[in-house]
Amino acid sequence: MAFESLTNRLQNVFGKLRGKGKLSEDDVNEAMREVRLALLEADVNFKVVKDFVAKVKEQAVGVEVQKSFTPGMVVVDIVHKELIELMGGSATKIAKASKPPTVILMAGLQGAGKTTTTAKLAMMLMKGNHKPLLIAGDIYRPAAIKQLQVLGEQIKAPVFTLGNDVSPVEIARQGLQFAKANSHDYVIVDTAGRLQIDEALMEELKQIHEVVQPDEVLLVVDAMTGQEAVNVAKSFHEQLELTGVVLTKMDGDTRGGAALSVKAVTGCPIKFVSMGEKIEPLESFHPERMASRILGMGDMLSLIEKAQSSIDADKAAEMERKMRNAEFTFEDFLEQMEQVRKLGPLDQLLDMLPGMNKVKGMKDMKVDDKQINRVEAIVRSMTTDEKRNPDLLNYSRRRRIAAGSGTNIAEVNRLIKQFEEMRKMMKQFSGMMGKGGKGMKGL
Ligand code: GDP
């Protein structure tokens, strides 16, 4: 899980402060010493850490604590705000040329995820009803053009190529003409990467830059490489004037160093983050959400946004009503599983919930899609009556269901038991929530 160790360490620091009624200078110093170590361990640039800690300290010492807050909460709040600031403040949008097409030049080292990100970016644009053209400018890596073509086909975005024998500069020039002639409003130029930054690579990029005059120059860097990603960004920015950075592989267990250092070191904001090898629309980078996530406050905003775009509100309300009245059946269970699935891989969802990393056993939990398929198969093998009235499920029916779903009786028994426990819990919850559901505080 990304940032896991940093989050745990920071939560420990703040946990100690939370209990205090008053913060002495010593308390703040001690906490900041630990914050400093936590950030350094997360591979954040040392100068960035130094400035960060100094800023927080300055605000935390002698702070006027309002009645409703404890001093610990005030420090968490300061750290939260400073983290947001560190990552660039507010989210930035992709450029839009006054006269289309808007040209986006993609740069990055080999393996950073440039081609994958190009496709994800195109998908994001298409979701916003744009008509992007992808230009295959990497003529050196074997199969790079093919890779882009395959991805283009997959997402139904056209790919412009002139093969391997024409120079990338010429490909970019002709590609741009093609885009204009075919009313594409966005052009994304995929370029060659190298294993390391070298002069020939920079020279070529500069020439392409000259020819296409991009509105946006995005550098794709691998978050898993930590400080190295920041160094790469710095060198590229010095030569190419980047407009933004895309951090890829944020689904991995990156310690956080790159996300927290890039903006401060290079002055260039992170505009997007990529999570996963599967081609899905690229996600905007929201410093505020990332800061909350790092502090273990979860990423509720992203989760809510995801849920809003993929969950049917009427259905969700109906489901909630049923849960409250303990009318929840296996039919509802199945439907709910389908809704949740639409949100994406479950372990990524768990990551977004506040405090999830604190729940015992949760952090190592791998949500197994195969297991979910089996559960689904069991429920689908039930008759409508059985789904609506699980009390009907006697031994012979369970045996039939096991055979029908290609599972075994133990699995069927386990699922029914879990389901019954869930129903019991819902009943208890609905009792706690009272009639209007307003009795529960917090989450
Ligand atoms: P390029 O050489 O920069 O064009 O890199 P590719 O787009 O070919 O990606 C290199 C490898 O990283 C491929 O195996 C991708 O599937 C993988 N990859 C790209 N982006 C991500 C990401 O966000 N998460 C993960 N886990 N893998 C990624």
Image (tube, rainbow, N blue to C red):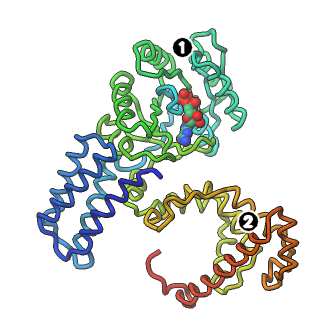
Quarter occupied by residue 268: top left
Position of residue 385 measured from the top left corner of the image (x, y, whole percent): 86, 80
- Give x and y (percent) for residue 91: 42, 48
Residue that badge 2 annotates: 375
Ligand 1 picture quarter: top right
Image position, residue 154 (x, y; %): 71, 36
* Residue underneath mark 1: 169
- Of labels 1 and 2, earlier in sequence is 1
Camera-nearest residue between 50 and 280: 50
In the rendered structure, which amino acid carries the disc numbered 1?
Val
Viewer-proximal residue among 120 and 197: 197
| 263 vs 311: above or below | above
**Local secondary structure at mark 2:** helix
Q: Determine whether, in the image, residue 162 is placed left or right of residue 401.
A: left
Label 1: state its secondary structure. Answer: helix
Who's the residue at 71% across and 72% down the image?
A: 415
Queried on whether the Cβ of the residue with tag 2 lies below 8 angstroms from ligand 1, the answer reads no
Mark 1 touches mark 2? (CB < 8 Å): no
